[in-house]
Image (cartoon, coloured by chain):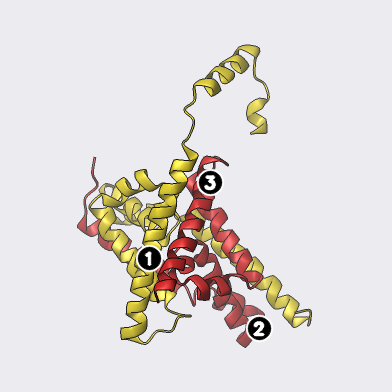
Amino acid sequence: MLAMFFWAFVIGGSICVIGQLLFDVAKLTPGHTLSLLVVAGAVLAGFGLYDPLVSFAGAGATIPITSFGNSLVNGALQDARNHGLIGVLTGMFQVTSSGVSAAIIFGFIGALLFKPKG
Amino acid sequence: MASKQKNVTPEQQKYQQLQQKHEKQRPVLKNCIRAFFVGGLICVIGQAISYFYIYFFNFTEQNVGNPTVATMVFLSMILTGFGVYDRLGQFAGAGSAVPVTGFGNAVISAAIEHRTEGFVLGVGGNMFKLAGSVLLFGVFAAFVVALIRTLLSMWGVL
């Protein structure tokens, strides 16, 4: 269990360093960087490389935004296995529904509770 | 970039060189160390939440990411609302932007920022102003990847 915390720290930190290098060295905006990381996660999932990382590093792989791309692909492939080609559309958000719905719900609650500063 | 370099007069070119000389060098190594530690720490918190869901709510290691992400987004709402997350972002750079809490922060701060314009056109219309690109390219890339894999397995290649 302690090893899991260690690898979550190391792998999660490393993915953030890749993001920081894209900020500083490649001079990309945060929007470009995050989009690139999501696409990278989806491509890694396509080759079946992201799930081994999740079972190895746990939250170190599921918390960075790359896992969003991975979950989208996994959901789409799961449904495609059962229902054929249309499953790519119907299954897309199956695995990652909570992230998007949580962002919308808590975003609205936040806007109700807090006032903008400055 | 290419379009910027075209049509510059010699004076402009000289100015650009001058500007480049005086531009502050970014402390890349320091930024990376900060991003590593803050990003790693956020993932450790995520791991702790994952274990909480595994032991008390019967999730498995494969599907525990889903509730964990929702909880992290909730925490990110609290921290964003009190203005803590933005200060963290100035310190940590990508360390706070790359984890899913950064995605939550982008949605929630846009929602709070635009509430003065009303809830329908302000909050509703601008909520995904920053995070929309992540959704668009994530969904489109996932669509292409999943389509290719499905077609390949239908044709018996995979």
Q: Is residue B131 above or below residue A77?
A: above
Horizontal placement of B88 versus A48: left or right?
A: left
Chain assigned red: A
Which residue is label 1 attached to? B44
Callout 1 amino acid: Val
Residue A102 appears in the rendering? no
Disc 1 vs disc 2: which is toward the camera? 1
**Mark 3 Cα-neighbour bin, 10 Å: few <14, some 14–19, many ≥20:** many
Residue at the spot of label 2: A84
Q: CA distance from mark 1 to mark 3?
A: 22 Å
Q: Secondary structure at mark 1?
A: helix
Tell which chain the image draws in yellow.
B
- The reply, left or right, for residue B39 in relation to residue A44 is left
- Residue A44 in view: yes
Q: Chain of mark 2?
A: A
Position of residue B86 measured from the top left corner of the image (x, y, whole percent):
32, 47
Q: Is residue B72 left or right of residue B130?
A: left
Image x and y of residue A19, in percent: 51, 51
Q: Tag 3: residue type?
A: Leu
Q: Residue at x 37, y 87 (%)?
A: B58
Of B72 and A117, nearer the camera is B72
Residue A15, numbered circle: none
Q: Residues within 10 Å of mark 1 (few under 14, many from 20)?
A: many
Q: Nearer the viewer, mark 1 or mark 3?
A: 1
Mark number for residue A21?
Answer: 3
Chain assignment, label 1? B
Q: How far is the residue under mark 1 from the one under mark 2?
A: 38 Å
Residue flagged by tag 2: what amino acid is it?
A: Gly
Q: Residue furthest front?
A: A3
Residue A13 appears at what percent x and percent y?
A: 46, 57
